[in-house]
Amino acid sequence: MMSLLKTILLVVFLAAAALSFAQTSAKATIEPCSCNFTTDPEVIKLAPPAYRSRFRPLDKIDSSFKTECGYLIVPENREKKHSRMIKLPYVIVRSKNPAKHKDPVLYTAGGPGGSSLGWVVNSTRSVLIEDRDCIALEQRGTRYALPYLRSFELDDAIKGAYRRNGNIDSAVLSGVKAVKGSLQQRGIDLAGYNTDATVSDIHDLLSLLHIDSVNLFGSSYSGGLMLAVLQKDPTRIRSLALDSPLPTFVPIDEDEPVNFREALGVLFRHVQQDSSAAQRYDHLEERFDRYFTSIKDSTFYLRYLEPGTKDSLSIAYTKNELLDIIINQLYDDRQRSHLPYLITQIIAGRHETYMTEKFNGLFRSYGAPDGMRISVYCADQTAYHSEKVIQEIGNLYPYLPGYRINDVYRAMCDCWKSPPIRQETRQGFYSLKPALLADGEMDPACRPLYIDRINHYMPNSQRFLLINKGHGVFNSKMMEIYRVFLNDPMKKIISTDPGIIGY
């Protein structure tokens, strides 16, 4: 019996050792290259002809700056022993300042699924480059990465469903299955695309570039990503700047419908405080809630002629499409001032102009989520969210159940089957690292509540609320504040701009 027990323990030990080896056998490397990054040719080949022209090479970087470009080559699936390797572009733009600081700024884009490299191209016109080098890493699966997880079956399925008044949810699931099959036919291991893997990519890049001190900069999803980078290994991290962040510990699927309604409530309060608009928009909040509750089970029809066709269609739509129009304008800082009028028109039943614009955009564009976005949301969020909590939203706002602000949701993830990220990544953690946190008071996605929650865990953080702003607030004024912060992250910054409230 003792001999059998020893044998079992030995087998367990060897299995654990093999698993450990499987996770670490492939080593990350760097391959220097020119900065002429282009989109994955496999995607360009598969793209609809009208869409191919949109895949432009990366814009040229101001030639007066010294740049270094390369590919970070890493395992596609870090949990597999024999994973294939993938290539992630990065760009370093060197500051011209001979007295520049040695701690660069490293940026990655939000989304998930956004491309990071455009930011570093624009960094040559930023105040940051005056003091520091700027680095951008293209996250795995995104526009200039190899491979790029883009396919077009989901776009086609959604458009087809609207054209024939089919069930949109059924069409989405059919499209998701087709996208998954298409990506797998290209040899892509979808289980390798999540926040945990990208965190390891960033640490590999810092290590291979021999960067001992770095300032992390992220927006929206990548705000949470940068928190996860800090959590994994804080030794190289000097500071963080998080623009409208989505922390890893926040259940966005459960929060976002109410986040939208809260942001709309801020708009309604501004309208009531505006003497010139108060009478025209009297009780607009109550009217909005009453109207959308009254139509929550209604179906409307639009006589619509799709551009480039000869025969018009009668296209069905519901309160969901009307809410899409409102939230899209709520996101847009330039168009938000027109939103109260738009709401009064929708409440009055004057939908035609707005729905026509919406369907023109839908049929013209390819806006469905790509494989990277689906994989990350399924692994990071949907794997942990509660359907029960989501249903409870209906107790507050009867018209919100069934309206999906996020374009990735549970039924899609049940098909996609992404393994969840580590539970530890989803947990809040405490840190004394300095952080600059900013959000807009009308952010419909990541409410200012989130920077307050981050501040709870990071007492050396500084928060800024931007009045009349939405999601993504690091404009030129905030970049000036960021520059001051970088030069002395522990010093309290006093804002003299009434539109930027420091607290």
Image: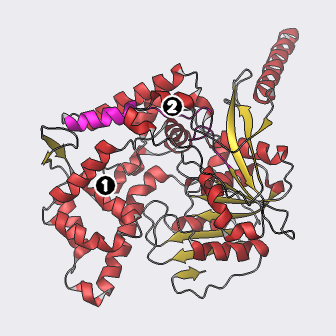
Task: Measuring from the top left, give residue 68's x and y in whole percent.
Answer: 77, 49
Name the residue: 60% across, 47% down.
58
Position of residue 4 in the picture relative to residue 198 (left or right) = right
The amino acid type found where label 1 is placed reads Asp
Q: Residues within 10 Å of mark 1 (few under 14, many from 20)?
A: some
Position of residue 101 in the picture relative to residue 301 (left or right) = right
Name the residue: 58% across, 67% down.
451
Q: Residue furthest front?
A: 63
Q: Which of 162 and 197 lies nearest the eye of the viewer?
A: 162
> In the rendered structure, does residue 284 fall within the stretch colored magenta?
no
User: Residue 437 falls in which quadrant of the image?
Assistant: bottom right
Position above or below: 107 against 383: below
Residue span colored magenta: 137-163
Q: Which residue is mark 2?
A: 43
The amino acid type found where label 2 is placed reads Val
Task: Measuring from the top left, give residue 476's x and y in whole percent.
Answer: 58, 73
Position above or below: 167 against 139: above
Q: Is residue 255 visible?
A: yes
User: Residue 483 falls in which quadrant of the image?
Assistant: bottom right
Coloring scheme used = secondary structure
Position of residue 111 in the picture relative to residue 427 (left or right) = left
Q: In the rendered structure, which disc, 2 or 1, sits on the residue that comes first in sequence?
A: 2
Q: Which of 317 and 100 lies nearest the eye of the viewer?
A: 100
Label at residue 324: 1
> In the rendered structure, does residue 149 fall within the stretch colored magenta?
yes
Q: Is residue 462 visible?
A: no
Name the residue: 49% across, 34% down.
150
Query: On the rendered image, what quadrant is the C terminus found in?
Result: bottom right
